[in-house]
Image (cartoon, rainbow, N blue to C red):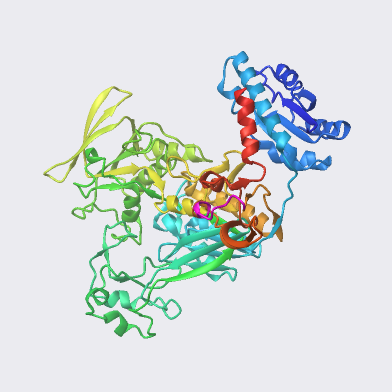
Amino acid sequence: MQRIGVFVCHCGTNIAATVDVKAVAEALGHEPGVVISQDYQYMCSESGQNLVKDAIKEHDLGGVVICSCSPRMHENTFRKAAASAGLNPYLVEIANIREQCSWIHKDIATATEKAIILGKAAIAKVHLNTPLTSMESPVVKRALVIGGGIAGIQTALDIAEAGFDVDIVEKQPTIGGKMAQIDKTFPTLDCAACILTPKMVEASQNEHITIHSFSEVEDVKGFVGNFTVKIRKKARYVDETKCTGCGLCTEKCPMKKVPNEFNMGLDNRSAVYIPFAQAVPKVATIDPNYCMMLKNGKCGVCSKVCSVGAIDYKQQDRIIEEKYGAIVVATGFNPIKLDKYDEFAYNQCPDVVTSLELERLMNAAGPNGGTLLRPSDKTHPHTIVFVQCVGSRCDDSKGKPYCSKICCMYTAKHAMLIREKYPDTEVYVFYIDVRTPGKNFDEFYRRAVEQYNVHYIKGMVGKVTPKSDGKIGVQASDLLSNEQLHIDADMVVLAVAIEPDKTARPLATMLTTQMDTNDFFTEAHPKLRPVESATAGIFLSGACQGPKDIPETVAQGSAAAAKAIGLLCKNSITCNPCTAHSNELMCNGCSSCEKVCPYGAITYIDKEFRMPDRTTAIRRVASVNPAVCQGCGACTVACPSGAMDLSGFSNSQIMAEVDAICK
């Protein structure tokens, strides 16, 4: 029987306010094998750790139970303390009496009783714990950034600056993301393209950065420090190595009525196109949905006018396989669809636009050359109504429950730009609350109200109705004056909610990392590890983790890069020894464990066994690669014969905990 020490933490009043800590320590002190049981104010403090170290040496402890907060918080802290005192770190067990006990109970007697039960379960497991030894695995000195928006670009540049090779995978034909579509940025009102395109060019010219545009991640295998990724490079039908970006093919193409995605469908492009003038890489792409040559074998004009012979109608998708030590997710966001919002007449009236569409209408490279005109008749609008929180902060069945964070600020920006360039235009903004949480953001909003005389009205727009005279009837309420308002507008601009890109969820499945209910990637810890995912080696950058403005996105991009660099700097990393293993005598070779393993750690081998009659037989049994296994335990659940077990969390250890709880 192990000689066990039990240490119960007060955690200030986090635990002690609801749990009688001294009673817990005293009760656990009577458990079999426990030779010391005491409480302390802050076990994670230096003096608290020294308490554990001294007890290990003085009482010759063979196991330690810490009754404190979640093991995600301080398990490594106490393992290191135990190791420094000569005890195998995997003989330390954490009983979570904070998140799973004190924080969810108000009655002291109930919480104390539960804390004692959780402590007993941990003691029962420690009795069966065995020393585990960590292996080391080499680190591939290359990073992958998934997404080529400003978040991905900043991350890649910072990693490359540290001297490591990095690949950017971008699903669009060019990097740049949503920032490339924006005209001006808040709160400085500087040109978005002027600050973005130098970074795009820098990324393309950096010797450590490889850009895989018009590509998507197809498959991810492996583990931290050694990921194997398959990248599908989609067919452009243009040879990137030959194309000079002259644009002659786009000019001569006879098919010129293709909706332009970059301009939000507000104008048309040709079937062969370059998204915008500063595209990186500046390479043409042929749209197979509209190209007459690819659809019916007729035309071929672009091939005839291309002087360098870059057009290749027979080009196929190809798969690239690379190894990476770290992966950074920067998949960005998209505005939500407005199919459920018929009250705003978005699908009925072309003069009802989203904020991103307004960006393109106001942009010098947009469909109107920078002049704000109504989409319906190309006339100058004199009354514009902005509607805030369209799809944000609303019922889950219709929109998003969260605040999209950037809408208040970009609406203030739009209002100021319109009033500055077109003083004869009246601007109304209907809002629920104005949220300006960033540096100089509130002052920016106040400028819109006080200096530019934008009419901010606290209230909701109930209905938008197109009229026969070309006007748009806006019915709304003013909550401060308790009045119903009717405004005849020339344009209505909807500040729609943003959501993660649709590629985020399937990507999360490939990366075996976590997402929240809104499909944003979940960070390992919201305060202490905000740019790391729960899966080791996977980092988060930008709006894939939650709504963010450009300054915050750039900051998080650099933070994710710093974390990735910290990993890539190591020649090897210590692997988790809590890995699966197979009892070959019980394994029936059914392949159930192999099918559920998300890391591809399980294979099957033919092994020779000696039978009772001294003959030999060949049987198919599971074999686990401990360097690849991440100890998720999926195989132990799936195994019908009970042959698969997990070191550190064996079936017998788990059942011992259950028995202790049920006594």
Looking at the rendering, in which quadrant would you find the N terminus? top right
Residue 84 drawn at (x, y percent): 82, 42
In the drawing, does residue 598 fall left or right of residue 115?
left
Nearest to the observer: residue 398 or residue 302: 398
Q: Position of residue 56 (x, y in %)?
A: 83, 34
Compared with 149, 410 (above or below) is: above
Does any portion of residue 356 appear in the rendered image?
yes
Picture quadrant where residue 464 is located: top left
Q: Is residue 180 above or below residue 391?
A: below
Extreme-front residue of the structure? 613
Estimate the x, y position of residue 282 in percent, counting from the top left.
Answer: 42, 71
Residue 315 to residue 558: above or below: below
- Magenta stretch in the rendered image: 585-594
Left or right of residue 8, residue 395 in this image: left
| Number of marks present in the image shown | 0
Residue 593 lies within the magenta run: yes
The answer to if 99 sits in the magenta stretch is no
Q: Which residue shows up at 36% across the image and 69% down it?
A: 274
Q: Main secondary structure of the magenta part?
A: loop
Residue 18 visible to an observer of this rendering: no
Q: Position of residue 30 (x, y in %)?
A: 76, 20
